[in-house]
Image (cartoon, rainbow, N blue to C red):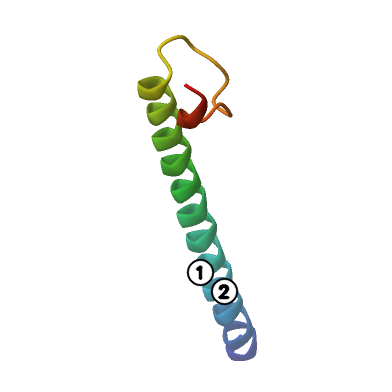
């Protein structure tokens, strides 16, 4: 059992860290998307696609 614990513990830690990183990346992307959407809403009175930038408004 000791050997199995020694192998499983680092693997579990790596998986946990990867999950944390993925979650942070997802959250960051979500926040960026929300900010872009809000800026698009402010910059463009009528709802053009979000790809339209403030420059073209």
* Rendered image quadrant of residue 3: bottom right
Expressed as whole percent of the image width and height from the top left, the position of residue 43 reads 39, 23
List x then y, in percent, for residue 1: 61, 85
Q: Residues within 10 Å of mark 1 (few under 14, many from 20)?
A: few
Which is more toward the observer, 28 or 18?
A: 28
Task: Describe the element under mark 2 as helix, strand or loop.
Answer: helix
Callout 1 touching callout 2 (CB < 8 Å): yes
Q: Is residue 11 above or below residue 23?
A: below
Query: Which residue carries the number 1 mark?
Result: 17
Q: Which mark is residue 46?
A: none
Classify mark 2: residues with Cα within 10 Å, few (<14), some (14-19) or many (20+): few
Cα distance between the residues tagged 1 and 2: 5 Å
**Measured along the vertical axis of the image, is residue 37 above or below residue 45?**
below
Q: Residue at x 51, y 30 (%)?
A: 53
Residue 35: x %, y % from top left: 39, 36
Looking at this view, name the residue that lies furthest to the left: 42
Q: Total of numbered circles in the picture?
A: 2
Name the residue located 48 percent from the left edge and 31 percent from the top edge.
55
Q: Looking at the picture, how far across and down is residue 4, in whole percent?
A: 64, 83
Query: Where does label 2 land, which residue?
Result: 14
- At mark 1, the secondary structure is helix
In the drawing, does residue 48 fall left or right of residue 43?
right
Residue 2 falls in image quadrant: bottom right
């Amino acid at each position: 059992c000791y050997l199995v614990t020694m192998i499983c513990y680092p693997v579990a830690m790596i998986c946990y860290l990867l999950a944390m990183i993925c979650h942070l990346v997802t959250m960051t992307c979500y926040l960026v998307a929300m900010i872009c959407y809000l800026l698009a809403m402010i910059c463009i009175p009528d709802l053009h696609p979000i790809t339209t930038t403030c420059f073209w408004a």
